[in-house]
Image (cartoon, rainbow, N blue to C red):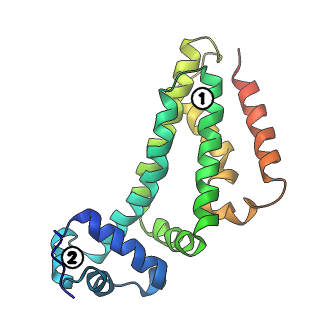
Amino acid sequence: MATTETLTAERILAATEEVLRRHGAAKATVVDVARVLGVSHASVYRHFRTKAALREAVTKRWLDRTSDALSGVVDADGPAEDRLRRWLAGLFEAKQHKAGDDPELFGTYTVLVGEASEVVDEHIADLTGQLAAIVRQGVEGGAFAPCDPDVTARALFEATARYHDPAYAPEWSRPDAEEAFTALLDLLVRGLRP
């Protein structure tokens, strides 16, 4: 079935996500993506030169959804402590939803994330950069003790890894997960205060 809609990278990525959901990372092919779009696989390759490039782009798109959602917290109104709590809670909630709402796709992306280390490194740099901005604002406003915002952001990110690293996904639905997360968050915030 031929399509009359213009083939864009975004359409290809959306179709790739559909194919990944249906077939998983191991069995999804560029031919499958092209079939969903009603185009030849050569048309897909015009936008993404290799299967690896396509997989990397779809992984980046998936990770960027979290970064984009959290970026609004950085410059939102309110005290830095509140924004830090909202940002870390937002990261945990986003990961919980990704794992719980679509477990097949989450499992597929966990495989793809393992393949796309540069994309993951960029994602982590973006997230820790957002955290560093909040910490910097807190230090400048006197809410947080003087510190190196970049080092502190990395420490906060690593300290909360249990609540955003996909390796811990099975623990996110435990009945006490929210309570344990809140206790950790309280401890971390107390440690930042002057």
Residue 45 x, y percent position in the rendering: 19, 76
Report the residue marked by disc 2.
44
Q: Nearer the viewer, residue 147 or 28?
A: 28
Location of the C terminus by quadrant is top right
Residue 136 x, y percent position in the rendering: 52, 22
User: SS class of the residue under badge 1?
Assistant: helix
Quadrant of the rendered structure where residue 38 is?
bottom left
Quadrant of the rendered structure where residue 78 is?
top right
In the picture, measured across the screen, residue 157 lies left or right of residue 126, that is right
Report the residue marked by disc 1.
83
Which comes sooner in the sequence, label 1 or label 2? 2
Location of the N terminus by quadrant is bottom left
- The relative height of residue 92 versus residue 76 in the rendered view (above or below) is below
- The relative height of residue 175 versus residue 153 in the rendered view (above or below) is below
Residue 174 x, y percent position in the rendering: 80, 60
- The relative height of residue 137 versus residue 1 in the rendered view (above or below) is above
Residue kind at label 1, given as amino acid type: Arg
- The relative height of residue 105 versus residue 57 in the rendered view (above or below) is below
In the picture, measured across the screen, residue 192 lies left or right of residue 140, that is right
Q: Residue at x 65, y 42 (%)?
A: 89
Residue kind at label 2, given as amino acid type: Val
Q: Residue at x 24, y 64 (%)?
A: 9
Q: Which residue is drawn at 50% across and 30% down?
A: 74
Q: Residue at x 28, y 67 (%)?
A: 11
User: SS class of the residue under badge 2?
Assistant: helix
In the picture, measured across the screen, residue 88 lies left or right of residue 43, that is right
Residue 173 x, y percent position in the rendering: 75, 61
| Neighbours of disc 1 within 10 Å: few (<14), some (14-19), many (20+) | many
